[in-house]
Amino acid sequence: MQTKSHLTTRMLTEGAMMVAISQVLSYVKLYELPNGGSITPDMIAIPFFAVRWGLGPGLMAGFVYGLLQMLTGGIAVAWQSLLLDYVVAFTPLGLAGLFKGKKWGLFAGIVLGCAGRFLAHFISGITVWRIVAPTEVLNMEFSDPCLYSLVYNGSYMLLDTLIALVIAAALYRPLRKFILGEDLR
């Protein structure tokens, strides 16, 4: 039987490891957009942790990862974009914790967490970045900040989400008991 103190130490250790794994994976850039945002495999570790430990620990891990992203080279035009594009954007990855213990929770959690992250980037795009937004993205001209933010942020967030889902599908079977937290009972 594991004590509460042992489980707390284990949760904190795993959280730190997942934040570190996310940070390392964020440097594996498959493509980088000109005004920030890139296609990376970093969206898997925080939802994995959140589904295993729950909503509170998941949100905290997402928050810490967002701070780390901001401090290690965040691109911003104002303090508002630092908050929205990093701290606020990465924290929702922990929403995956709502699906703790659910058989397909990791997949639903990835979709929900990435949707939350996209929403923060979308809001930043229409409120902060519209000031410096180029009129052309992907050979299309934009005059509407909402449409620009949707296309710009959606272009990499959709691919990030799909990459995380593919990685989750590959890892699910061999790591099922860990994802579902069966080793913690």
Image (cartoon, grey):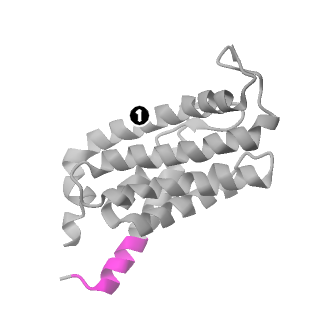
Question: Between 172 and 107, which is closer to the camera in this rendering?
Answer: 107
Residue 64, quarter of the rendered image = bottom right
Q: Position of residue 142 (x, y in %)?
A: 72, 21
For the N terminus, which image quadrant? bottom left
Residue 7 position within the rendered picture, expressed as x and y whole percent measured from the top left: 31, 78
The residue at the point 49 percent across, 52 percent down is 22
Q: In the displayed structure, does residue 156 sit left or right of residue 86?
A: left
Tally the numbered discs.
1
Going by the numbered disc 1, the residue's amino acid type is: Leu
Specify whether residue 99 is in view.
Answer: yes
Q: Label 1: few (<14), some or many (≥20) within 10 Å? A: some
Residue 54's place in the image compared with 83, above or below, is: below
Q: Position of residue 41 (x, y in %)?
A: 46, 41
Give yes or no for residue 92 being in the magenta stretch.
no
Outermost top residue: 139
- Image position of 97 (left or right of 30): left
- Quadrant that contains the C terminus: bottom left
- Mark 1 = which residue? 162
The residue lying toward the viewer, choosing from 144 and 44, is: 144
- Which residue lies at the image location 82% right of the left edge and 36% below the top edge? 131
Tell me where the magenta segment starts and ends, as one range.
2-12
Report helix, strand or loop for mark 1. Answer: helix
